[in-house]
Image (cartoon, helix red, strand yellow):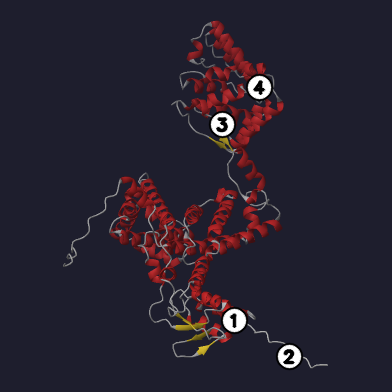
Amino acid sequence: MASEAPSITAPEPVYRTPWQRWVGFWFPAADPTTLGFIRVTTGLLVLYIHIAYSIDLQQFFGKHGWYAAAYIERERHEYPWQVSPFWSWDPESVVPAKVPEFPHRRKAVVDFIRALPADGAKRKASLEFLRRVSDSDNPEAPVVALNWFQDMRTFPERRDRYLAALVSGQVPAVQADQPPTPAPPAFFAALPVAERERVANDVRAFWDVLPARDTGARAYVLNHFVELGPELRRALVHFLYTLPDDPAEREKKIEYLDYWNNEADKALRTGHKVFSVWFHVTDPTQMALVHACVLIAILLFTIGLFTRVTSVLTWIAVVCYIHRSQQILFGMDTMMNILLFYLMVGNSGAALSVDRLVARYRAARAGFARAGFARAGGALPPATQAFLDAPPPSRSAGLALRLIQVHFCFIYVAAGLSKLKGGAWWDGRALWDVVVNPEFTLMQYEWYEKALRAGATIKPLYYAVTVLGVWGTLFIEIAGPFLLWTRLRWLIILLATAMHAFIAVLMGLNLFELLMIIMLIAFLPDQVIRDRLRGGPALPRLKLAFAPGSAAATRAAALAVAVDAENQVALVPDPGATAPVLTDAQGTRTTGPHGVGALFRSLRLLAPLSFVLWVPGVRGWLAGRLFPAPAAVPQPAAPTAAS
């Protein structure tokens, strides 16, 4: 019966549920070579950054560094975190007391707070005037009342005249030898006589607790209460009212306000929930040893040795450096942390790593151990050969790449939309402000300044360059995250790379921009990195003859296969071979140290490492493993002559 003709139409698409599409988006089976390349480039930058820290290790992270250990210890235990109420729209319940920012003014206010009566009743009596004016519903009333009080200066007779006018409700006649007495604030004058007398007594009590001799400190205290807004003024008065009677607790609250300009009681929580080894290791010698161990871990991560472990150690170590010096935290540290975290999530050591070489060695050993290897003419099983040809697709690598891609898009959208909040990004001034900023740009070079001046004299050229630069940046950062998922991905990658290179040159943000470009690598199509790293068909071809029955020979052959990333070596099982023999394309047969040299000259992976053969003893050590000599066969003892 004739067979049915095959269909020439495309197969029907397989229906996938929304959940399957969601899972397929986050967990695609991706070539791990791209993630491995990101690991290598990121690792090199991270290693460079932390080697640079070695020069100023004590200044950055030491006990007496630029931000000393005593300060970071206090910050990580006491730093106040403020948030608004979750249910209420009124934030007054969490508004903290504030003292002036300028040190000399802050000292005057804090000294005034410390000098208040320790007894709670006396302190509240002395602050009743402040409480009364602060609780007023009229936002102008406290300012008017405090200015009226401040106008009394430090003259008791002047105070008495002001208060007499307040109590009597009449402004006295102007005396020849005295300045005119102003009318009391209208909201005080409208009170009943008994209440006005009470206000006068409150004024006298407040007068007595203010600095009397230091008129400058007195002015700083009163000016601070005048300059505060209604909510902050009420918060400070409440703080003064509720100071504890216990001297130790009282001093603790005042000192916290002085140091942090905040209240621990009004904070959601205090301190940073972070860890750093530099919080605990401060001895210079111990710090040098820990830093050296960190550099070794970063190096092992970069070359891909024990990657699953060293990726975690590298991320933890880098976070320790960041947590110790958060005051110098920069965009470079953030991008570095993001990449290291995702490289820890995915199996970044599945390709372009020492771990991959070890996996190739084990796969080759397993292939040699299978029955029929010699009968197959030296051909490894298809599954083993496929594993050696390319690392298998990895869903963990796909997840890590997807996370980098999505995070990159969020970074771009946030950066682009935030630029729209500034007027300079609407009229084109932003680019000009960048290129003429002497802190970041090339303004130190005369040729650069002359070029800018010459370009700025041509008005159409100035507007064309600045406007195109600004709108081009906004297009890349706002439209790019959406176009990266379309056929225009190549264009956005090209434009974004050019933009980051431009910023790196003009602003000197080299490491930050390089890390951003590395994140763009995650958008390259699958297998692009592996295809670009291939050596091509012109590489030398070799043959390795070995005895498959010899354990030492199979180990040597497996080592050769492990470092043969381009499949340059053809295996030739030879049961009669006493030791592995390497044959090059010209038919030259080598073994031992000469064979090691031939392998390093011919194999693409080993050629850049040929310098290690000049180290005494290395060539001989490698020859013993790649070209082991046949084991000596014990000879039977000669018979002894009969006695």
Tell me the distance, in whole angstroms, between the alpha carbons under discs 1 and 3: 79 Å
Q: Does residue 442 appear in the picture of this structure? A: no
Check disc 4 and report the residue beneath it.
209
Question: Which element is circle 1 on?
Answer: loop
Indicate which disc, 1 or 4, sits on the residue closer to the N terminus: 4
Residue drawn at the location 48% of the way across and 27% of the way down: 91
Q: Are marks 3 and 2 in contact (CB under 8 Å)?
A: no
Structural distance between the alpha carbons of marks 4 and 3: 19 Å
Residue 387 image position (x, y, % from top left): 43, 68
Q: CA distance from mark 4 to mark 2?
A: 115 Å
* Number of the label disc, if any, that sits on residue 366: none
| Residue, disc 1 | 628
From the image, tell me which residue sits under label 2.
638
- From this viewpoint, which residue is outermost toward the front? 642
Residue 563, x across and y down, in percent: 50, 74
- How far apart in space, not on screen, are marks 2 and 1 (Cα)? 29 Å
Disc 2 element: loop
Image depth: mark 3 or mark 2 in front: 2
In the image, 375: left or right of 481? right
The reply to whether the C-beta atoms of the residues labelled 1 and 3 are less than 8 Å apart is no
Judge left or right: residue 206 versus residue 533: right
- Residue at label 3? 98
Question: Compared to 350, does 155 lie above or below?
Answer: above
Image position, residue 475 (x, y; %): 31, 53
The residue type indicated by label 4 comes to Val
Q: Of residues 547 and 131, which is closer to you in this image?
A: 547
Residue type, mark 1 in image: Pro
Residue 546 appears in the picture as rendered: yes
Residue mark closest to the camera, 4 vs 2:
2
**In the rendered structure, which disc, 4 or 2, sits on the residue that comes first in sequence?**
4
Q: Residue at x 68, y 87 (%)?
A: 635
